[in-house]
Image (cartoon, rainbow, N blue to C red):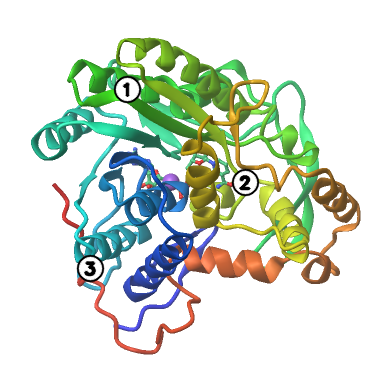
Amino acid sequence: MIIEPRMRGFICLTAHPVGCAQNVKNQIEYVKSKGKIDGAKKVLVIGASTGFGLASRITSAFGCDASTIGVFFEKEPSEGKTATPGWYNTAAFETEAHNAGLYAKSINGDAFSDEIKNQTIELIKKDLGQVDLVIYSLASPVRMHPKTGVLHRSSLKPIGQKFTNKTVDFHTGNVSEVSIEPANQEDIDNTVVVMGGEDWSMWMNAMKAAGVLAVGATTVAYSYIGPEVTEAVYRKGTIGRAKDHLEATAFDITKDLASISGQAYVSVNKALVTQASSAIPVIPLYISLLYKTMKEKGLHEGCIEQMQRLYADRLYTNTIPLDDKGRIRIDDWEMRDDVQEQVAKLWKVAETENLSEIGDLAGYKNDFLNLFGFGFDGVDYQADANEMTLIPSIQ
Ligand code: NAD
Ligand code: NA
């Protein structure tokens, strides 16, 4: 069938298998062009199918020649209905990895559950014995707690007071004012349960207990800080509390892994268009101004450039450079004074009429389409595409 983007709010209901495969191939080519990285050889990526997790898996495989197991939650296709992009991304990744002689298998299911943890541990035991790197890159609005059975929902709200600022509907380019009511304590607690560090720590403890972590194993989870204009809804909001918890959990995990000399790190990454970030109010306007500024300065990076740099210049160097809170910073170019000063200036004047000029709205839209396999050069979108073709080797 001919597959076209069907937008509904902050998501696209369709995904293009050939376009998703092109996206993965482009990322692989980028990593290969940067040369080999002397890094981990057996890697588990939790949240491996899109965004930073997919880019981490690609960097592990094609930068470090690593065997990879990927865990994610994606919908398979049915006749006439496409799969979610992560399904096609993974199928394409596995094909390329297998062609390159690299081990790659995947598990599709709820990473928050005991069942998926156990299944993953069994697969590691059977095929790899142990892993030396665990990437934790989940982004989810909900978490069913495995011990209580309670379904927790995260929220994106300010804390303490109502927050009002500019936002953009990136489909139309319409800049408007948005007001978000403050969170109550329950909102905060739930967001910490979903996006904080408890599940990460559960994974690491279960893996350690099962003996599937190599001596000196490293684990990395991803965080975000960002500018003052998004602070109330991001870093000082409900999601920020979850990130505080995630960052604190890194130190707990390092203690828990002491007997095998394991290390847990949080890497603070750059703001990028992903399915997760598109749903956060205010952030898309910031991203479109940031993209414009960073592209002008020759500093722009996507997920793959970020993850390649994380591995090559941070994780696999003699000593991992950390900030005063013990975090890895790969958001260093985003947070540069000249970049932030420029974005702050643009923010003050941004409106519907000038956004396509002072902001990179086109770049935002293109990246958003790319997430679903649309908008790639070299893909014939008028051609018949088989929604059922690409199938990952789900275990
Ligand atoms: P994403 O939506 O692209 O990826 C999320 C991944 O998690 C997918 O592989 C998805 O299948 C998987 N997933 C979701 N729920 C799951 C579940 N229940 N079980 C198994 N897998 C599940 O998101 P992303 O933007 O790459 O975010 C990854 C991490 O990076 C998050 O911690 C996010 O906060 C962080 N981060 C994002 C940005 C940004 O601007 N996008 C910036 C800095 C840090
Ligand atoms: Na991810």
Which of the 4 image quarters holds residue 9?
Answer: bottom right
Residue to which mark 1 is pinned: 204
**Does residue 229 lie above or below 305 as drawn?**
above
Whole-percent x, y for residue 155 in the image? 56, 33
**Does residue 248 lie above or below 69 as drawn?**
above
The first of marks 3 and 1 along the sequence is: 1
Does the Cβ of the disc 2 residue fall within 8 Å of ligand 1? yes
Question: Which quadrant is home to the N terminus?
Answer: bottom left
SS category of the residue bearing label 3:
loop
SS category of the residue bearing label 1:
helix
Q: Going by the image, does 342 lie left or right of 91?
A: right
Whole-percent x, y for residue 100 in the image? 24, 63
Q: Are marks 1 and 2 in contact (CB under 8 Å)?
A: no
Q: As drawn, which residue projects farthest toward the front?
A: 318
Residue to which mark 3 is pinned: 390
Q: Are marks 3 and 1 in contact (CB under 8 Å)?
A: no
Could you classify mark 1 by the number of other residues whose Cα lies within 10 Å: few (under 14), some (14-19), or many (20 or more)?
Answer: many
**Residue located 37% across and 43% down the image:** 47
Q: As drawn, which residue projects farthest toward the left?
A: 126
Q: CA distance from mark 2 to mark 3?
A: 30 Å
**Residue located 85% across and 61% down the image:** 351
Q: CA distance from mark 1 to mark 2?
A: 25 Å
Q: Mark 3, mark 1: which one is toward the viewer?
A: 1
Nearest to the observer: residue 35 or residue 389: 35
**Residue located 33% across and 41% down the image:** 45
Instruction: Determine which of the numbered discs, if any, sits on residue 270 in the image.
Output: 2
| Identity, as a three-letter code, of the amino acid under mark 2 | Lys
Whole-percent x, y for residue 280 in the image? 61, 45
| Identity, as a three-letter code, of the amino acid under mark 3 | Leu
Which of the 4 image quarters holds residue 36?
Answer: bottom left
Does the Cβ of the disc 1 residue fall within 8 Å of ligand 1? no
Q: Going by the image, does 369 lie left or right of 92?
A: right
